[in-house]
Image: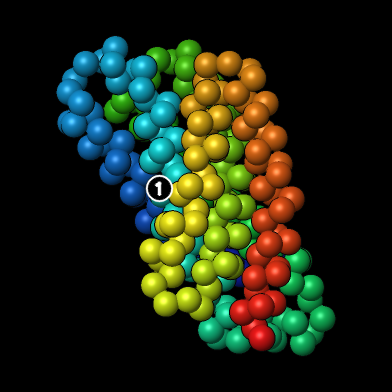
């Protein structure tokens, strides 16, 4: 499993799959103040929601690269022949995807908080919410990537699948900044996604291989 994680991490960084989402996230947070104006009080009130919406959109970018390349290159078939369970492959991809996406996004959120005039006392809450919620985003991205692997126009289909399912993460993630109840709901949603995503991805990969 460690070898699979290292392989996917290396591919994410070399292929730009880890850099583009962060660049997109920062671009959204840079443009937003120009759209609403320089009112610091207004920006501070909406900053957490903007960060979470931008994070979900950024999480959509690498979805096509999570499963489809391995499916097309026959890597999944080779691993299956060697007796590696598809659930283990999916779990390794989930861990690698989060490592390449979650921590860098949390660091980028520090820059975004300054651009959006986020008060310092709320920054810690935003970072905690991202630490809890980004594994859920990674899990949702993996499941979506497996479901659309091999489909024509997979990018558009991935958006139609992932964005509606990611709405609870955005709502609870933004709400976690305001209350502990929101953080609990975010944690519960993330846990469900982490447990379910490898199973869904493994089933989708099995169907795609047949």
**Vertical arrangement, residue 155 with respect to residue 135, above or below:** below
**Vertical arrangement, residue 54 with respect to residue 178, above or below:** below
Image quadrant assignment for residue 44: top left
Total numbered labels? 1
Res 16 seen here: no
- Image quadrant holding the N terminus, namely bottom right
Q: Residue 1 vs residue 99: left or right?
A: right
Q: Residue 186 vs residue 41: left or right?
A: right
Please provide percent x and percent y for residue 191.
Answer: 71, 41
Q: Residue 107 vs residue 39: left or right?
A: right
**Considering depth in this image, is 48 or 166 the residue closer to the camera?**
166
Res 143 seen here: yes
Please provide percent x and percent y for residue 133.
Answer: 58, 38
At a point 52% along the width and 23% down the height, the residue shown is 175
At a point 30% along the width and 20% down the height, the residue shown is 43
At a point 65% along the width and 74% down the height, the residue shown is 205
Q: Residue 179 vs residue 195: left or right?
A: left
Q: Which residue is mark 1?
A: 57
Q: Secondary structure at mark 1?
A: helix
**Vertical arrangement, residue 126 with respect to residue 18, above or below:** above
Please provide percent x and percent y for residue 158.
Answer: 46, 61
């Amino acid at each position: 499993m460690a070898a699979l994680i290292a392989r996917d991490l290396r591919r994410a960084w070399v292929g730009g799959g880890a850099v583009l989402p962060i660049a997109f996230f920062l671009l959204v947070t840079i443009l937003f103040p120009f759209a609403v104006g320089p009112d610091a009080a207004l920006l501070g009130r909406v900053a957490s929601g903007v960060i979470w919406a931008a994070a979900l959109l950024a999480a959509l970018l690498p979805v096509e690269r999570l499963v489809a390349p391995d499916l097309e290159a026959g890597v999944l078939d080779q691993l299956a022949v060697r007796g590696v369970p598809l659930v283990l492959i999916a779990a390794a991809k989930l861990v690698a995807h989060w490592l390449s996406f979650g921590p860098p996004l949390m660091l980028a959120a520090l820059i975004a908080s300054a651009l959006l005039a986020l008060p310092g006392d709320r920054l810690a809450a935003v970072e905690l919410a991202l630490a809890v919620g980004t594994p859920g985003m990674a899990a949702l991205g993996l499941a979506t990537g497996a479901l659309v692997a091999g489909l024509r126009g997979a990018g558009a289909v991935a958006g139609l699948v992932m964005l509606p399912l990611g709405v609870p993460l955005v709502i609870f993630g933004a709400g976690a900044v305001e209350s502990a109840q929101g953080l609990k709901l975010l944690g519960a949603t993330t846990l469900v996604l982490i447990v379910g995503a490898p199973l869904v991805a493994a089933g989708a990969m099995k169907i795609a291989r047949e």
